[in-house]
Amino acid sequence: MTVVALLSVAPVTEESMAGEVAKAVEALEEYDVEYETNPMGTVIETDSTDELFAAAQAAHDAVDGDRVSTVLKIDDKRTREVAASEKVEAVEEELGRPARSGSE
């Protein structure tokens, strides 16, 4: 099984969120997950939903604030192994180029 998820954890504030987001990302280090942070969240890849939910809970709990917003979107491949990078590669194959602007 492959579980790929997009996790976004942030305090609700008018100030910079970078420090608190860094705490959430750092919390993922305690779990058996691969991750990559981008401007909109962190893509997580793991073998089980149990590990994903534990990691997401830790990331959520790591953020300080009176109000914390967390969004978790999950793609749970139950019948085959598909790495997150393979999903991007499939789109790029269809495009015939990298899946980003200015890359023709």
Image (spheres, helix red, strand yellow):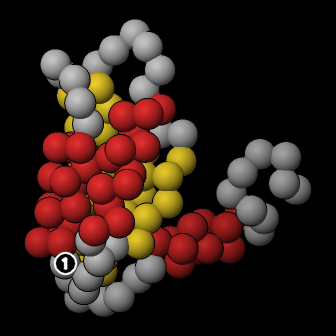
Viewer can see residue 4:
no
Where residue 15 appears, x then y in whole percent? 43, 13
Residue at (35%, 44%) from the top-left corner? 23
Where residue 26 appears, x then y in whole percent? 38, 54
Q: Quadrant of residue 14?
A: top left
- Quadrant into which the C terminus falls: bottom right
Q: Quadrant of residue 9?
A: top left
Q: Residues within 10 Å of mark 1 (few under 14, many from 20)?
A: some
Q: Which residue is mark 1?
A: 48
Q: Quadrant of residue 94?
A: bottom right
Question: 100 or 43: nearer the eye?
Answer: 43
Residue at (29%, 19%) from the top-left corner? 12
Where residue 100 appears, x then y in whole percent? 72, 51
- For the residue marked with disc 1, what is the amino acid? Ser
- Up the image or down, 37 lies above or below 49; here it is above
Residue at (42%, 26%) from the top-left corner? 17
Where residue 25 appears, x then y in whole percent? 38, 51
Give the tally of numbered discs.
1
97 left or right of 6?
right
Q: Determine whether the residue tagged by mark 1 lies in a helix, strand or loop.
A: loop
Instruction: Name, please, the residue furthest toward the top.
Output: 14
28 left or right of 87?
left
Question: 20 or 45: nearer the eye?
Answer: 20
Question: 41 or 79: nearer the eye?
Answer: 41
